Image (spheres, rainbow, N blue to C red):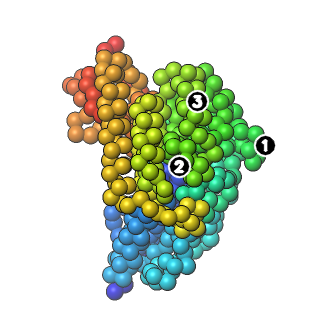
């Protein structure tokens, strides 16, 4: 059965996976809008043309992407939509296999196929719109992708297979993007990349992240700049100096460490050791007092013994990360680790992940409770269920803690406002506060 009304200029973009995928979807939406087309992000309506931007990082993400593709493929069969296109990491990596398995999809595109995708959608790729996007986040914060791809040899990671080699975006282009975002009301930039600390090596023959931070902080209207996905090996220490000296750079660092056991770090091809990692973390806290450190860990990697896991638990206990997430290891084809025997049973992986998160929840609770009575600057993200909901400098959207401020008769805050609040209560992953009186 055919869809009753077909409008070739209406496109619904559905995004799966990380903030880097969201950035790519926003660029696609911006290009479509510039071509005079109606572009929607994750609309609940039956828009005639659907583009699914997929994730191919780990098993759960791949499964979610495939289920989403199947959902829209069935909607096409049922006549609810006319066309289904698939792009992103999963499509880049498994295009041929998926094409055979899901013939209802009209075309498949990789991570670097934006011009071809636009042509298929009967839109022209407008080079003059480099960096222009249609934001899907609230206007007051936006992700800024500073580079694409990755040159790191991590054994477990398929990102280089899907995203290619590291390619930095020039500082002047990123500043123009930041100026455009600021003109739209953006106050917080969230810097993202596969490896942000590698920034500049390809363009400037040196790690140039600190200069980028300085240049972005000079953009009028930008008040917070938050750094994500810093690789620990070869970490540029001048970034810490800039963070300590520059009030616009949030005292926040997202540094995925993945493990602490020397045996695991070596097998993972991380290029570091437990001793060097501890030294770097100590340096971060010494140079930037009060810094909020966020990290992620992998449990159940091939060959991980109980001793390796115990080392990881002690490491987390001793370093008391403000934020921490855990992944269970996922065997990925064509990676170096895929040659190893995936010998840790799934139930053991799950048990270790739960145990590590129990440790982190206790640490997080203690850190949160220590904030009771303090005054914090928060950025208001939304109003929900009788509370203004915001974030401190120590918190990134979606993944970190929120501050809930009960709205009184006289209190009024707008989304995107900064406010001074006093913390009145705390839970492991949330804070409660009241607006400070003048």
Residue drawn at (75%, 48%), measured in percent from left and top? 202
Q: Quadrant of residue 83?
A: bottom left
Residue drawn at (49%, 58%), measured in percent from left and top? 302
Q: Position of residue 347 (x, y in %)?
A: 33, 58
Mark 2 sits on what residue?
Answer: 264
In this rendering, would 192 be left or right of 214?
Answer: left
Residue drawn at (55%, 79%), measured in percent from left and top? 96
Instruction: Say if 41 sits above or below 293 in the image.
Output: below
159 or 218: which is nearer to us?
Answer: 159
Q: Could you tell which of marks 2 and 1 lies nearer the N-terminus?
A: 1
- Under circle 2, the secondary element is helix
Q: Could you tell which of marks 1 and 3 lies nearer the N-terminus?
A: 1
- Pointer 2 with pointer 1, Cβ within 8 A: no
Q: Which mark is residue 181?
A: none
- Under circle 1, the secondary element is loop
In this view, the residue farthest toward the top is: 438
Mark 1 sits on what residue?
Answer: 205
Q: Residues within 10 Å of mark 1 (few under 14, many from 20)?
A: few
Q: Residues within 10 Å of mark 2 (few under 14, many from 20)?
A: many
Q: Residues within 10 Å of mark 3 (few under 14, many from 20)?
A: few
Q: Position of residue 56 (x, y in %)?
A: 49, 63
Q: Mark 2 and mark 3: span between their CA atoms?
A: 18 Å
In this rendering, would 187 be left or right of 81?
Answer: right
- Under circle 3, the secondary element is helix
Count of numbered circles in the view: 3
Q: Quadrant of residue 409?
A: top left
Q: Position of residue 320 (x, y in %)?
A: 42, 30
Q: Mark 2 and mark 1: span between their CA atoms?
A: 31 Å
Q: Nearer the viewer, mark 2 or mark 1?
A: 2
Q: Position of residue 69 (x, y in %)?
A: 41, 72
Whether residue 84 appears in this view of the structure is yes
Mark 3 sits on what residue?
Answer: 279
């Amino acid at each position: 059965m055919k869809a009753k009304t077909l409008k070739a200029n209406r496109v619904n973009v559905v995004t799966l996976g990380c903030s880097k995928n969201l950035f790519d979807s926003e660029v696609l939406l911006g290009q479509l809008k510039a071509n005079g087309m109606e572009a929607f992000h994750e609309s609940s309506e039956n828009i005639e043309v659907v583009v699914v931007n997929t994730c191919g990082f780990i098993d759960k993400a791949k499964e979610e992407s495939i289920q989403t593709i199947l959902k829209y493929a069935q909607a096409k069969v049922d006549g609810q939509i006319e066309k289904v296109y698939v792009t992103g990491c999963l499509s880049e990596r498994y295009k041929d296999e998926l094409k055979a398995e899901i013939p209802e999809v009209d075309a498949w595109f990789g991570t670097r196929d934006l011009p071809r995708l636009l042509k298929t959608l009967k839109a022209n790729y407008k080079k003059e719109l480099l960096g222009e996007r249609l934001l899907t986040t609230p206007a007051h914060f936006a992700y800024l992708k500073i580079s694409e791809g990755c040159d790191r040899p991590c054994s477990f990671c398929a990102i280089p297979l899907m995203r290619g080699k590291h390619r930095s975006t020039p500082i002047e282009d990123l500043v123009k993007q930041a100026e455009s975002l600021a003109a739209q009301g953006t106050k917080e930039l969230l810097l993202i990349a596969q490896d942000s600390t590698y920034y500049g090596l390809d363009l400037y023959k040196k790690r140039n992240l600190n200069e980028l931070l300085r240049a972005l902080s000079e953009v009028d209207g930008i008040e917070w700049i938050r750094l994500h996905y810093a690789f620990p090996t070869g970490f540029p220490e001048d970034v810490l100096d800039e963070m300590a000296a520059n009030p616009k750079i949030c005292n926040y660092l997202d540094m995925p460490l993945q493990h602490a056991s020397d045996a695991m770090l070596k097998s993972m091809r991380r290029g570091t050791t437990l001793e060097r990692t501890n030294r770097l973390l100590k340096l971060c806290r010494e140079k930037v007092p009060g810094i909020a450190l966020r990290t992620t860990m992998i449990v159940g990697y091939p060959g991980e013994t109980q001793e390796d896991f115990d080392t990881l638990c002690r490491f987390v206990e001793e370093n008391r990360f403000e934020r921490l997430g855990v992944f269970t290891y996922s065997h990925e084809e064509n990676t170096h680790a895929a040659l190893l025997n995936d010998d840790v049973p799934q139930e053991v992986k799950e048990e270790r992940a739960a145990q590590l998160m129990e440790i982190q929840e206790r640490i997080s609770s203690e850190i949160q409770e220590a904030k009771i009575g303090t005054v914090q600057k928060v950025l208001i993200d939304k109003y929900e269920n009788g509370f203004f909901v915001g974030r401190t400098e120590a918190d990134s959207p979606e993944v970190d803690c929120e501050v809930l401020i009960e709205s009184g008769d006289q209190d009024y805050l707008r989304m995107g406002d900064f406010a001074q609040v006093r913390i009145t209560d705390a839970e492991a992953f949330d804070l409660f506060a009241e607006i400070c009186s003048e």
